[in-house]
Amino acid sequence: MQVSFWFDPTCPYTWLTSRWLVEAAAVRPISITWRLLSLSALNEHLDVDPEGDTEGHLWLPARVCAAVELAHGSEALRRIYERLHELDDWDWAKALEAAGLPAALAAAADSAEFDDHLRASTAEGVAKVGSHVGTPIIAVENGPAWFGPVISQAPAGEAAGALWDATVVVAGTPGFHELKGGPHAL
């Protein structure tokens, strides 16, 4: 099953969703294509940025990721995303080197050269689910697409697979719109 995963590299909940999706792919026949959804691009037309990013700092990691994606593809995009979170210091050059990528791509952070790519990729993901959402967006090729799930813990192993199965069924149900959970575990 081919799945596209749109993410903003700075969103902590999206990071947890990505860890769940990787776990699900280990126990289900899922192949992931990593795509960018820039919250900066998504919100740039708003008078007040819901992310509170008045200085535009969220563009920086998205631009580095866009440079990686365009030069080296989806798998390299996954690697830089993982290194940025695992190193947890947002040192672009160090993360690029740890991901086996040229450190020179770090210069993309300070260039608007990749902003149109970020806008287009964001628009492509949002078009699958509607403009009322953010990151992450997951789309199954020739199947359903959805926002989320927004999770505070990433299930592992068969629990990750079970959540995948349930999410695909729910998202693929005609007329389905939204599901939210409470703070309590079952």
Image (cartoon, grey):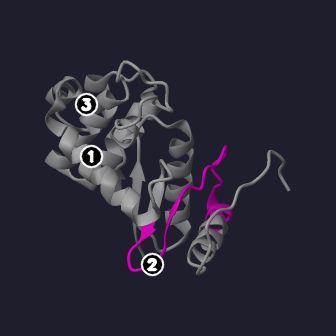
**Amino acid on which the number 2 mark rests in the picture:** Gly
* Most foreground residue, 129 or 140: 129
Question: Label 3, on which residue?
Answer: 97
Report the span colored magenta: 139-161
**Amino acid on which the number 3 mark rests in the picture:** Glu
Residue 177 percent coordinates (x, y): 61, 67
Query: Residue at (53%, 72%) from the top-left corner?
Result: 28
Query: Residue at (43%, 27%) from the top-left corner?
Result: 87
Question: Is residue 159 inside the magenta stretch?
Answer: yes
Where residue 163 sits, quadrant-wise, is bottom right
Query: Residue at (35%, 55%) from the top-left corner?
Result: 34
User: Can you say which quadrant of the picture contains the C terminus?
Assistant: bottom right
Q: Which of marks 2 and 3 is nearer the N terminus?
A: 3
* Most foreground residue, 56 or 75: 56
Q: Is residue 178 left or right of residue 112?
A: right
Q: Which of marks 3 and 1 is nearer the N terminus?
A: 3
User: Can you say which quadrant of the picture contains the N terminus?
Assistant: bottom left
Label 3 element class: helix
Question: Label 2, on which residue?
Answer: 143
Inter-mark Cα distance, 3 to 1: 26 Å
Q: Report the number of discs.
A: 3
Question: Which of the labelled discs sits on residue 119, or is there none?
Answer: 1
Q: Which of marks 1 and 2 is nearer the N terminus?
A: 1
Q: Is residue 103 left or right of residue 3?
A: left
Q: Residues within 10 Å of mark 1 (few under 14, many from 20)?
A: some
* Most foreground residue, 172 or 81: 172
Q: How crowded is mark 3: few (under 14 residues within 10 Å), some or many (20 or more)?
A: some
Where residue 172 sits, quadrant-wise, is bottom right
Residue 42 percent coordinates (x, y): 38, 43
Q: Residues within 10 Å of mark 2 (few under 14, many from 20)?
A: few
